Image (spheres, rainbow, N blue to C red):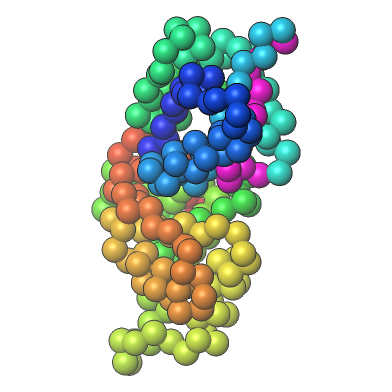
Amino acid sequence: MPKIALLYDAGQAVLSTFDLDEVLHRILGIARDYFHLPNAAILLVDKEAQQLKVRAQIGWDPGQDQICLGWHEGITGAAVQKKQPVYAPDVSRDPRYVCKAQRPLCATCLVNALTPPVFRGEGVSSYSRAGRIPGSVNAPWTSLIDPETNRFREPSELREALDQVGALSGTPVIAYCGGGISATVDLFALSLLGRGDARLYDGSLTEWSRDPSLPLEVG
């Protein structure tokens, strides 16, 4: 999902009778719900230290709210410099973007629902490039369906198949395939096991492999 960066001058809207932190958290809640963001943060300018410091955040990992930026660094810094809002449709592709809060790959379980040969990048690919998104695990949708009945396998079998790839460990799960169809089988199986919070990368490999700047793994 595209990321969005906004500059909001809270000082123009906050009355002295309100607690600043409470107001900032309400602003964050509104932004998160309106834009459907998994996380959001408000950075304030420390003119003395010439830094941007996190004052309020929602959804960040522990310790990442201690991150500081130079006050003209990154997209938020550009907004400070211009003293006006900056709109960035996709933050990660903006040349001004600075990532100071990277999550480790193990923080998300990325499930590839395609067959093992396609997962390994073997044979002729139906996509722009063969392979898988780096860090992916393979839980083929075909392994979750009983071929004789075309129904989902027993819950114990589903649990074993999905648990062994880490999809039931409690970390966030994103499933993908070639075009966002086969992966829905994995998502349904996860939902049957209580992981209704798993998400679909609907563009999947059709979208990912089309961009030559995005890496793919084979083998």
Residue 102 picture location, percent across and down: 61, 36
* Residue at 56% in and 35% down: 23
125 or 159: nearer the viewer: 159
Disc tally is: 0
Residue 189 picture location, percent across and down: 43, 76
Image-based side of 70 in relation to 136, left or right: right
When the figure is inspected, residue 27 is found, relative to residue 6, above or below; the finding is: below
Say which quarter of the image contains residue 20: top right
Say which quarter of the image contains residue 6: top left
Q: Is residue 6 magenta?
A: no
182 or 14: nearer the viewer: 14
When the figure is inspected, residue 7 is found, relative to residue 154, above or below; the finding is: above
When the figure is inspected, residue 99 is found, relative to residue 113, above or below; the finding is: above
| Stretch in magenta | 49-61
Q: Is residue 56 magenta?
A: yes
* Residue at 61% in and 42% down: 60
Residue 99 picture location, percent across and down: 57, 28
When the figure is inspected, residue 207 is found, relative to residue 27, above or below; the finding is: below
Residue 141 picture location, percent across and down: 39, 72
User: From this viewpoint, is residue 164 visible?
Assistant: yes
